Image: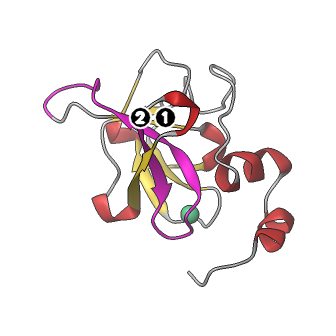
Amino acid sequence: MLPITEEEWKKKLTEDQFYVLREKGTERAFTGVYDAHFEKGVYSCSGCGIELFSSEGKFDGHCGWPAFSEPVESEKVNLVKDQSHGMIRVEVTCANCGGHLGHVFNDGPLPKGYRYCINSISLDFKKA
Ligand code: FE
């Protein structure tokens, strides 16, 4: 998508969405609507609408945020080294709009072993 200004994002998103998607905030653990949500369907970016994750790859990570073993296609997300808050983590962003989604960790289910730990507020769900 064509880049839009942060001012335009502010108009397009709710305050909480703006805080997470554009300011790389994190919703409080166990508060997001999709944390304990296991219906079949697709999760899209709440910033731009592209499909990012599927219920197929969702698992209960017991971490307080929606957890996925992989995105629907690897090209849908970008992985960025993140050294904020005194930690070395890998940030996950939407490849289309650049919105912050969450982080990916190495403690997910085998065979892939990844846990994409994603803020609920960065996602919209469409039931299959
Ligand atoms: Fe997006």
Give me the disc on residue 39.
Answer: 1
Please name which of the two marks, 1 or 2, marks the residue nearer to the observer. 2
Tag 1: residue type?
Glu
User: Where, by quadrant of the figure, is residue 60 drawn?
Assistant: top left
Do tag 1 and tag 2 residues touch (Cβ < 8 Å)?
no
Q: At x 39% / y 63%, what residue is drawn?
A: 76
Other-residue count near label 2 (Cα within 10 Å), few / some / many at <14 / 14–19 / ≥20: few
Q: Earlier in the sequence, mark 1 or mark 2?
A: 1
- Label 1 beta carbon within 8 A of ligand 1: no
Residue range highlighted in magenta: 88-111
Q: CA distance from mark 1 to mark 2?
A: 33 Å
Counting from the top left corner in percent of width and height, residue 36 is at 55, 23
For this orientation, the residue located farthest to the front is: 86
Question: Residue 5, can we see it?
Answer: yes
Q: Is residue 52 left or right of residue 35?
A: left
Q: Tag on residue 88? A: 2
Residue drawn at 68 percent across, 32 percent down: 27
Q: Is residue 58 above or below residue 94?
A: above
